[in-house]
Image: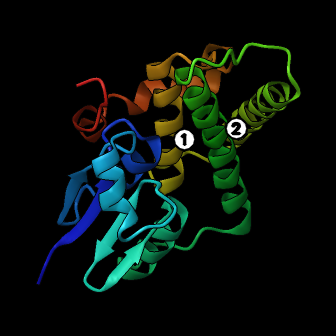
Amino acid sequence: MKKMQLFGSTTSPYVRRLRLLLQDVEHELVLVDIFNSRDRAEIQSDNPTLKIPMLKDANVTIFDSGAIYRYLQEKLDLPELSWQRQNVLTSIDAANDSLVQMFILSRSEIDVSADKMYFRVQRERLDAVFAHLEKQALAGAFAKWDYLSMSLFCLIDWVMFRQLYQVSDFATLENLYTQWKQLAICHQTDPRV
């Protein structure tokens, strides 16, 4: 039987959170560069969204990190996220999505610091989400190392790696990040290596 395959890059925060989740599960990481036309063509043959991560397991192909998590949750008998925790994950994803869009626009030589509505909305979302995540952290939402904490860690680490947002304004988030980055699996999946 063919082992589970996770398609993605070592720099994607969405891929990395799944790699952290799968640390004790046999799988293969298939590296793809979504900015490379050959790799995009390979992904598109199974995934019309042209996004990573993508998971293949036996005859199942799944296109999105959220859907992949739900699949793995069932397959690996992981605890279901409460609606409150799902909202926290949605907040993490919203920040990730805004930052990825800004990063791609910046790499396309578009000035994301411009005072334009699109960029103002993204910055407003980021400020609101990080303030919300700080409150959630203070309330203990990230007290254990689980998918929610892994997702937050990957967001913060990617922000620092790409120098996209100032997380140091949020002491509780920064303390959690400092604690988590000491974990062996976080070193093993570090995109800087």
Task: Classify residue 179 by image quadrant.
Answer: top left
Q: Is residue 8 visible?
A: no
Q: Amino acid at mark 2?
A: Leu
Q: Quadrant of the C terminus?
A: top left
Q: Residues within 10 Å of mark 2 (few under 14, many from 20)?
A: many
**Considering only order in the chain, which callout, 2 or 1, is on the residue closer to the N terminus?**
2
Percent position (x, y) of residue 188?
22, 36
| Label 1 sits on residue | 152
Task: Identify the image quadrant of the N terminus.
Answer: bottom left
Q: Is residue 74 left or right of residue 98?
A: left
Please give the label number shown on residue 133. 2
- Residue 131 appears in the picture as rendered: yes
Expressed as whole percent of the image width and height from the top left, the position of residue 166 reads 63, 15
Mark carried by residue 59 = none
Mark 1 to mark 2: distance in Å? 9 Å
Q: Secondary structure at mark 1?
A: helix
Could you say which is closer to the camera, residue 102 or residue 175?
A: 102
Pinpoint residue 48: horizontal percent, then vertical percent: 48, 66
Mark 2: secondary structure = helix
Residue plotted at (83% across, 28% down): 124
Colour convention: rainbow
Q: Position of residue 115 (x, y in %)?
A: 85, 15
The answer to whether marks 1 and 2 mark residues whose Cβ atoms lie closer than 8 Å is yes
Identify which amino acid the numbered label 1 is placed on: Leu
Give the quarter of the image for residue 27.
bottom left
Extreme-right residue of the structure: 117
- Label 1 Cα neighbours within 10 Å, binned few <14 / some 14-19 / many ≥20: many
Q: How many marks?
A: 2
Q: Residue at x 22, y 55 (%)?
A: 30
Q: Is residue 33 above or below residue 67?
A: above
